[in-house]
Image: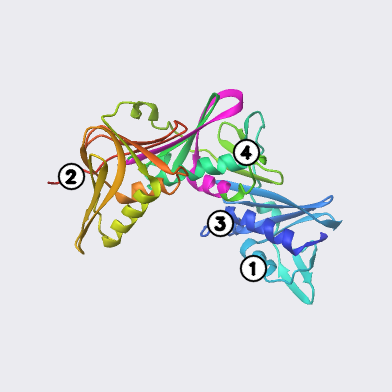
Amino acid sequence: MKFTCSKADMNEAINIVLKAVPGKTTMPILECVVIEGKEDELILTTNDMSMGIETRLPAKIDEEGIILVNAKMISDIIRKLPDQEIYFESDDRENILLFCGKAKFNLSGKNHEEFPMLPDIEKSKKIVISQFTLREMIRQTIFSISNNENNKILTGELFEINGDEFKIASLDLHRVSIRKMQLKESYENLKVVIPGKTLGEVSKICTGGIDDEVEIYFSKNHVLFQYAKTIIISRLIEGNFYNINQMLTNDYETKVVVNKKELLDCIDRATLLLRESENKPVIMNIKNDEIKMEMNTKIGSMDENVNIEKEGKDLRIAFDPKFIIDVLRVIDEEQVNLYLFNSKAPCFIRDDHSYIYLILPVNLIE
């Protein structure tokens, strides 16, 4: 195989496929990237057996072929090359020559036939969504997934389609994040659970705007995200997701409207009193037209008043401060609406019904 390509294009492509190279593995072959020269482009492929990525870049192909090389090594080399064209040549014995400017590397490749290539996915069931919207939907929900591998279903996010409604949901048994949107057309109803790791990488590759689309295809065991020049294939998580609809309610006895930044800054200041191993709640005393925020730890205590608009009863309730901070950081609106029932019932944070966040309170020890 012989080809010439730009350093910038190759560097960008390598950075994309590196996301599917495992950090630690008992299969050294998975630490490699497949580089294939075909017609007028290069095709780069990586696969960690749960997620695989393929991306393409333009190149002048003098001799078609395919080679396997350590992904981290070739990435480091290309990143530090001068900003000039790269000339690449390999022979049947997996020897690789790489030239760029005055730099010359002689590398050892591997037999590509041992590499587990990406599965063929039947492109039948699909939806089309803008990259910007998908990135935002993932950003507003992914922080609520669980990192407990003993309950695998909670390490992923629910993708649910009902006609023209698309919903993403995640939960970790302490909180639930739900983001909905209306699709441009109706699709066949569908429910799948996609690993959080995959969605984290998907959102990083979704760099396009509202007019840049991504096609999402679903099969029995896999999901495929297709961009203009990149595809991501991931295994689905088997099992039934929790019935989140039965957790939702429109009933409340107290509604609070508060400035998001003021509330976030106040809770953030309160956490300054927390040691790393300490788990103390932030207490909200909701009364009249203000919330009195309280934090008591081994280091000290603080209280601060935040102005609000309130409907309904006064209430004293406590939450894990991290769970409040997480959601406030992903809400873009200036005002936040909190709906509460009592000190032991979940609090709902809603955004005109397209975004719902549910958080369980912490029991107050008086």
**The residue stretch that appears in magenta:** 174-203
Instruction: Find residue 84 and report its horizontal and vertical position in percent.
Output: 78, 68
Answer few, some or many: residues within 10 Å of disc 2's Cα (few below 14, many 20 plus, some between 14 and 19). Answer: few
Q: Specify whether 171 is left or right of 366.
A: right
Report the mark closest to the observer, 2 or 3. Answer: 2
Residue position for label 1 = 76
Residue position for label 4 = 130
Circles 1 and 2: CB atoms closer than 8 Å: no
Answer few, some or many: residues within 10 Å of disc 3's Cα (few below 14, many 20 plus, some between 14 and 19). Answer: few
Mark 2 to mark 3 CA distance (whole Å): 50 Å
Q: Earlier in the sequence, mark 2 or mark 3?
A: 3
Mark 1 to mark 2 CA distance (whole Å): 53 Å
The amino acid type found where label 1 is placed reads Asp
Q: Residue 303: name its quadrant.
A: bottom left
Closer-to-camera residue (170/29): 170
Answer few, some or many: residues within 10 Å of disc 1's Cα (few below 14, many 20 plus, some between 14 and 19). Answer: few
What secondary structure is the stretch in magenta mostly built from? strand
- What is the number of callouts on the image? 4
Element under disc 3: loop
Closer-to-camera residue (262/24): 262
Element under disc 2: loop
Mark 4 to mark 2 CA distance (whole Å): 44 Å
Q: Residue 17: name its quadrant.
A: bottom right
In the orientation shown, which residue stands out farthest toward the left? 366
In the orientation shown, which residue stands out farthest toward the bottom? 102
Residue position for label 3 = 27
